[in-house]
Amino acid sequence: MRLSRFFMPILKENPKEAEIVSHRLMLRSGMVRQQSQGIYSWLPMGKRVLDKVNKIIREEQNRSGAIELLMPTLQSAELWQESGRYDAYGKEMLRIKDRQERPMLYGPTNEEMVTDIFRSYVKSYKNLPLNLYHIQLKFRDEIRPRFGTMRSREFLMKDAYSFDLTKEGAEHSYRKMFAAYLRTFSRLGLRAIPMRADTGPIGGNLSHEFIILADTGESEVFCHKDFVDFDIPAEDTDFDNVAGMQSIFDKWTSVYAATSEMHDEAAFNAIPEGDRLSARGIEVGHIFYFGTKYSEPMGAKVQGPDGKEHVVHMGSYGIGPTRLVPAIIEASHDENGIIWPASVAPFDSVIINMKAGDEACDAASERLYAALGNAGQDVLYDDTDDRAGTKFAAADLIGVPVQVIVGPRSIANGEVELKDRKTGARETLTVEAALNKLTG
Ligand code: P5A
């Protein structure tokens, strides 16, 4: 992508409305724009990162055996009357009427709708277990939307829903998602700690929130320090292995971790003082087992091996991609801007042509741009006629992992400079050697 043809509206000034660093950096680097309170457009730079986050989420959902579909944002109120949540949900639900005066709502979650899909098609235990997920916008009319896309009113959610014949089966499904979440957050460059959590309007009594430790987090959390060193399940993990899933779950729930709503002061104080971690955190995922809370009133039943009808056991599993993006920034930035983990970076590298219009600089930049592109890399080429200092500042702000700096003095010797955004380490190499290093 040539910067001269891209749309990357960088702000020079620090936006006043931004209270936390991720919000400030997302506005400054032109990733998002607020359209009305708690409702955002994702501009091209932001959209690139969001797509990479979603890709990793999808890969790990698919690996664990979940199947993707797409349900609508608007739902009929009738479904929610069946489960009893239409009245219970309160003011967070945006209620709308269509031209026929039929009550509709902008979905804050999809337990009812997916249960309706399930009951319409699945009649036998032979089709179980089943886990269906989608990545779709939600709307919650939060009292206090804040911190940009961290707590917005319209936001993206990956929500998965599992269906099993028995409670034991449902618990295995829960543990599969638990392991898939550990892998997902780790691939996003984050260490998320699963913590026993309150279930709120979703219901049930088994639930874990996945929390990233960050000073700007909205939740108060308490846990054992050991979490920092626990192993993440490997890529070849067998998600159908019941004992294997159980042992991952047991390990990750073997030491104390809870949000403030579930906090047990005595249990926490039993941890040796030096091992206690009392911190703030960002909830990036939340999983629930709620048994038959929706399947019972909505009549989601299958015929079991005994020939009788059984109400299915369900769980639901959420991740917030539009919250994850700022959460990653909270965890990875410095005073000059964002430092993207390679897995979600909007571009793999940025070529900074320090003197656009200079024959040698243009020729070398073009060569690098073409060769890196041909090698399948996502490259941003700063071909604008801005001053070199402006270009360096922009490159640091947008946080692309590698900067390839092409300047008139070094290119006279056939050399360019590579700068690692994270460490700041610089290296002077010939164009050829730089290409080998970046594509090798
Ligand atoms: C689980 C999936 C649910 O809604 N139903 C379907 C269950 N859970 S949840 O905890 O309420 O939300 C899941 C995740 O969505 C993100 N999230 C938000 N992100 C941005 N702004 C918001 N206002 C917001 N609310 C929830 C969080 O990542 C949460 O863990």
Image: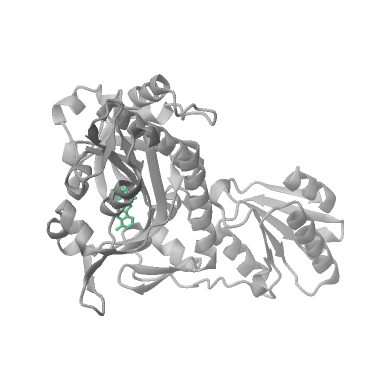
Is residue 223 shown above or below 77?
Answer: above
Residue at the limit of the structure toward the front, as seen here: 307
- Percent position of residue 12, x then y: 50, 72
Quarter of the image where one finds residue 362: bottom right
Q: Is residue 281 above or below residue 71?
A: above
Residue appearing at x 20%, y 77% in the figure: 101
Residue 196 visible in this rendered orientation of the protein? yes
Q: Write the residue at 18% across / 47% down.
A: 200
Residue 288 visible? The answer is: no
Q: Is residue 235 left or right of residue 213?
A: right
- For image coordinates 39% across by 62% down, the residue present is 23
Residue at (85% x, 66% y) in the render:
360
Q: Is residue 370 above or below residue 301?
A: below
Residue most toward the bottom?
Answer: 99
Q: Could you say where residue 53 lies in the image, as x and y percent from the top left?
A: 49, 51
The quadrant where residue 168 appears: top left
Residue 208: image location, x then y, percent: 28, 37
Quadrant position of the C terminus in the picture: top right
